[in-house]
Image (tube, rainbow, N blue to C red):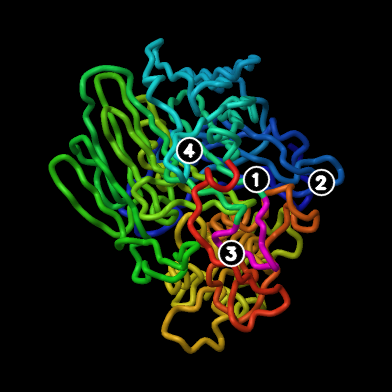
Amino acid sequence: MTAPAGTWSRVPIVLTRRRAGEALHDATHEPITLGLPFPPGAVTDAALLNLRDASDRRVPLQARALERWHDGSVKWALLDFQTRDDTTIFNVGAGSRMSDAKGIELTQTSGGVLVDTGAARFSMLVHRPFPFASVAIDAREVIDRERSGLRVVDGTGRQCRVQVRRVVVDEHGPLRATVLIEGTIASWTRPLLGLQARLHFFAGSAAVRCALTLRNPRAAVHPSGIWELGDRGSVYVQSVELETALSEGPTADVSCSPELERPIERMSQPLDLYQDSSGGEQWRSPTHRNRNGVITTSFRGYRLNTASESAAGQRATPVITLERGRDRIAVTMEQFWQNFPKSLEARDNAVVLGLFPRQHADLHEIQGGEQKTHSFTLAFGRDPLSKDAVRWGRLPRVGHSSAAYYCAARAVPYLVPSHANGMCAYDELVASAVTGPHAFERKREIIDEYGWRNFGDIYADHEAAFHAADEPFVSHYNNQYDAIAGFACQFMRSTDVRWLTQMEELAAHVVDIDIYHTTRDKSAYNGGLFWHTYHYVPAGLSTHRSYPSAEGVSGAGRRTSTTTPLACGSITC
């Protein structure tokens, strides 16, 4: 790393909590991943970067270039490291290649990938259960191979086949490695959904971060240009659940914390935690209508039932841990209640995560070209990173640099730090988007912009300018004017993590819901964004900024056929 005039060779990194005021203690052992820009000519080789903590101790670092300047120097780098105490301040600087990193061993075979993190051995194989064919610690099998796996029940009540067709190494670094799994979920006669997952493994740990995407590759029919729920291209499922079971043995001890503010406590099996709605004041919002116009949320918040007690609450971010001797399984999910309906259960020495839970009052509809990515954490060992996964898996910290550095790096041109000379009035106005009564996060509560399909989107309240009815006016923003880029710029100008959180949540929503993930429609539509819209009309049964069946809607035609509930087997399976 060289430092041209006007730049510096040490870049500050700070770890910040996403939301202030949470009672959950920070994890002392946590994997951190962040992107960092560099000025032109400052970094020639990302592998030569090093990381030091506040006491100037060297911390193992994994770094690779994501984008380069015109001269070949690094413009953006992806950094990975692990915290090992309560340190929150670090510095990135020039150095030599690391030789003391523990490393992760990966073996790619024709049948799949074997991963050895030093704390556990994982195997992921084609034509075997998803995600793991086996998990071993100290040569001892941890999971029950026959019982563990992804279970899918289609809209007719029939069990689907989950087929792993491809397993490859996506990224191999000394501290974090990623394995890509692709497959299909099939009914009796033909594929129902596409499956894609990225599993992130960490050196010295038996904890795994998982991002599982389920996609309906069919095209929507959208008769007369109307895009609504109930379209003939939709797929329906009763449930999608991931079961992770301990190997055979005595009954395990169960511990659970339903909310971030609640301690982890011993509970009895069976345990069933089900989040039916957001738990907010508008939990019965028309946002949650199904294809028949029926609001499907049944009660406010979540319910927790065990063999000995029942409880209820508003917004769960749970963790469940099974422990028996040296064996351990912990499962948790960030943004659990926000992506309702969701469930987390412990039964028969297994933890079951309901991605599309069977407890829901209706079938789960996945529209043509629609997908959903579910992110969660599985931990199997007693290494420090796995034990702390009950914290960082629920509320991970954010790593970032200073506003002065982001602006000076010039990776995003024309940025100046917030409240710079002449910018105060502008910044006070802009800040109302993340603070005060008109903040985007608070506006979500007006129409309850939550649930797996809606969370991350912005309430387009400007569309309600002429609305006079008592019922909330539902309109979805869908990043129509690239709010993602705006959030990113405001974060780098201020390092207020509320901007970063808004950016990440909206980006995840756009990637899954607002991009039309099909190649089977018109070429002008395939892979496109749902930006076509009719103004000042409630969304109705349309889940995008597009044309609903409504009086006064013109230019896209009207659908006259009625919508009836269809099981996936009766559509195309």
Q: Can you see residue 116?
A: yes
Residue at 50%, 62% in the rendered image: 291
Mark 3–mark 1 CB contact (< 8 Å): no
The amino acid beneath tag 4 is: Ser
Q: Main secondary structure of the magenta part?
A: loop
Within the image, what quadrant is residue 257 found in? top left
Instruction: For label 3, count other residues whose C-alpha is less than 10 Å away and answer few (under 14), some (14-19) or many (20+).
Output: many
Residue 228, disc: 3
Q: Nearer the viewer, residue 490 or 197?
A: 197
Image coordinates of residue 476 in percent, x first then y, are 57, 69
Residue segment shown in magenta: 219-231
Where does label 1 land, which residue?
A: 217
The amino acid beneath tag 2 is: Trp
The quarter of the image holding the N terminus is top right
Decide if residue 281 is on the left or right side of residue 68. left
Where does label 2 land, which residue?
A: 69
Q: Nearer the viewer, mark 1 or mark 2?
A: 1
Disc with the residue nearer the chain's start (2 vs 4): 4
Image coordinates of residue 76 in percent, x first then y, are 71, 45
Residue at 39%, 38% in the rendered image: 28
